[in-house]
Amino acid sequence: MPEHKYRFNPQTLNFERIRLTAWQKTKRVLLMLLPGLVVGLLGVFLIYQFMDSPKEANLRRENQHLQLQFELLNKQLEEVQGVLTDVQRRDDNIYRVIFEADPIPASMRQAGVGGVNRYRDLEGFASSDLVIDTRKRLDQLSRKLVVQSRSFDEVAQLVMRKKELLASIPAIQPIPNEDLTMMASGFGMRIHPIHKIPKFHAGMDFTAKTGTEIHATGDGRVTYADYGTNGYGMHVVIDHGFDYETLYAHLSELKVRVGQRVKRGDVIGLVGNTGLSAGPHLHYEVRRKGEPVDPANYYFNDLNAEEYARLVELSRNAGQSLD
C-alpha cells in the first residue's frame, strides 16, 4: 500500500492529506529521470565522437582500400605513360622517318584541353585531390592514345603507298656516269660563272655533250616543259608527289610535255646550253616541300658506295658552277 503524505493546516488545526495533480506527478518523474538521461546522452555522444560504429568502421576500411587502389592505379598509369612515350618516340624517329612523314608536333601530342573546370563535381571530398589527379591523368592519356592511333592510321596508309613512294623518290642520276665528261659543281655556295660573285647553287651540274639524253630520276608528272626567263633556259619540272620535285635545266630539246606521266629512267630531254649557262651541261635540282636539297643524297639506286663517295667529293671540291 503506497505511503501517503500529509501536511498540517493551521486554520483547521488538522493534518490534511497531500494530493498531487497529474502534472506535478509528471514533473517529479521527469526531474528524477533527467540526470540519468543527461548522463546517457553524454555517454552516447562520447561513444560516437571517439569510437566508430560498425557501419562507420566498415566504410573507413573501404575508403582505405579504395585509396590504396587509386595509388596502384596511378603507378600503372605511370607505366602505361612510359610505354606510350616509347611508342611516340619510335613513331616520330623510326616509322615516320622511314615513310618520309613529318613527326607529330609536340603541341598536338600533349593534347591539352582548356576551358571550364571539368572536374568540379569531384571537388569537396576527403580524397578529391587524389581522384581528380587520377582522372586528369586518365583523360590526358586517353587523348594521347587518340593522337597516336591517328598517327598509326596515317603510317598504315603510307605503308600501302610505300611501293609508289619508292618509285617516286628521285633515286638515280639524271645522266649516267658513262655519258658524263665531268662532274662540274655541287650543292652550296659557288662562284657564278657569268656574274663572278659567290652565289648559292641549288643543285648539281653534270657536264655532257650537247644532245646527251637526260632521264627522269623518279616517277611523276611533268608540270613545266618550256623555255623560261629565269636563267634556266629550256627546262623541265617534274612533280613526284610526296612533297618531291625535280628540275632539269639548260636543255637543248624537250622530249616531254606538261601533264605527261613519266617513269624513272624515261628520257625527258637532251643536254644543252640554253639560258644563263657557261657551257653544255645539265643543272639538276631536287626540291623537298618547295625547298632545294642536296641531290647527292638521292642517288642510292644508282651508285655503289665507292662511286657515291667519289661523286660527293667531286661535287664539294668544285669551286665554280656552270650556271
Image (cartoon, rainbow, N blue to C red):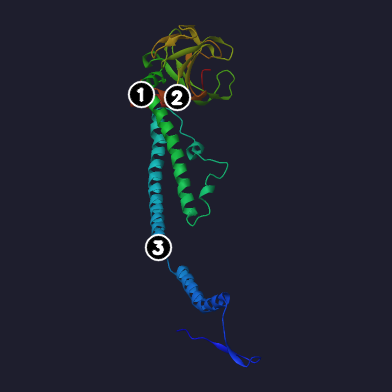
Residue 281: x %, y % from top left: 47, 14
**Label 2 sits on what residue type?**
Ser
Using residue 221 as the reference point, say whether residue 10 is left or right of it.
Answer: right
Residue 101: x %, y % from top left: 44, 28
**Label 1 sits on what residue type?**
Glu
Callouts 1 and 3 close, C-beta under 8 Å: no
Rounded to the nearest angstrom, the CA distance separating label 1 from label 3 is: 82 Å
Rounded to the nearest angstrom, the CA distance separating label 3 from label 2 is: 83 Å
Q: Nearer the viewer, residue 193 or 266?
A: 266
Write down the residue under mark 3.
57
Residue 144: x %, y % from top left: 45, 39
SS assignment at label 2: helix
Which quadrant is the N terminus positioned in? bottom left
Q: Nearer the viewer, residue 315 or 139?
A: 139
Write down the residue under mark 1.
307
Task: Identify the residue at horizontal 44%, vertical 44% (top origin).
Answer: 138
Q: Earlier in the sequence, mark 3 or mark 2?
A: 3
Q: Is residue 209 visible?
A: no
Crowdedness of circle 2 by 10 Å Cα count: few (<14), some, many (20+)?
many
Write down the residue under mark 2.
315
Task: Identify the residue at horizontal 46%, vertical 27% (top origin).
Answer: 316
SS assignment at label 1: helix
Q: Earlier in the sequence, mark 1 or mark 2?
A: 1
Task: Identify the residue at horizontal 46%, vertical 47% (top origin).
Answer: 135
Q: Earlier in the sequence, mark 1 or mark 3?
A: 3
Rounded to the nearest angstrom, the CA distance separating label 1 from label 2 is: 12 Å
